[in-house]
């Protein structure tokens, strides 16, 4: 994979700005941030540094929380994301409500 040119990076950032701005204007953006690389894996056996290092392993580069009436509507929102045009994929899931305590 080749490095992107400055113009390609600028166009990508503009696409992201338009996408995020549109979500905000439509009242669909509830939150989200990019994630830094690295991290830790926590299990019953302890904590280890096991960052995912390649796209084939399923890197999660960030998250968005959007407001949608259905999973299908959320998938449509995701399909318009600039990440798709960059040969990425997006996993869409519903947030489960917390049971009353």
Image (cartoon, helix red, strand yellow):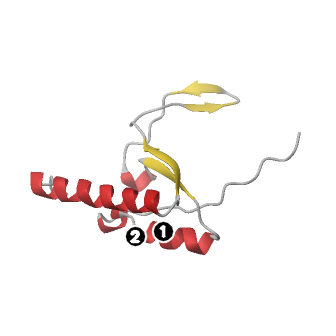
Tell me the residue at 56%/63% (across/down). Answer: 92
Do residues under tags 2 and 1 come within 8 Å of each other at their CB atoms? yes
Characterize the local packing of mark 1: few (<14), some (14-19) or many (20 or more) Cα atoms within 10 angstroms: some
Q: Which residue is mark 2?
A: 80
Q: What is the C-alpha distance between the residues marked 2 and 1?
A: 6 Å
Looking at the image, residue 40 sits to the left or right of residue 79; the answer is: right
Q: Residue at x 39, y 37 (%)?
A: 37
Tell me what residue is drawn at x 38 percent, y 57 percent: 21
- Quadrant for residue 53, please give it: top left
Viewer-nearest residue: 96 or 46: 96
State the residue lying farthest toward the right. Answer: 101
**Residue 88, image x, y percentages:** 37, 62
Residue at coordinates 52% horizontally, 60% vertically from top-left?
27
8 horizontally vs 92: left or right: left
In the image shown, does 35 or 48 lie closer to the viewer?
Answer: 35
Mark 2 crowd level (few <14, some 14–19, many ≥20, 10 Å Cα): few
Secondary structure beneath dot 1 equals: helix
Q: Quadrant of the N terminus?
A: bottom left
Q: Which residue is label 1 attached to?
A: 77
């Amino acid at each position: 994979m080749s490095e992107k040119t400055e113009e390609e990076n600028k166009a990508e950032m503009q696409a992201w700005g338009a996408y995020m701005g549109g979500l905000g204007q439509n009242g669909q953006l509830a939150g989200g941030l990019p994630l830094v690389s690295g991290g830790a894996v926590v299990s019953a056996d302890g904590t280890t540094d096991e960052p995912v290092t390649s796209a084939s392993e399923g890197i999660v580069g960030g998250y968005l929380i959007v407001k949608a009436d259905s999973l299908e509507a959320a998938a449509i929102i995701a399909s318009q994301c600039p990440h798709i045009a960059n040969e990425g994929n997006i996993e869409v899931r519903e947030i489960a409500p917390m049971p009353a305590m």
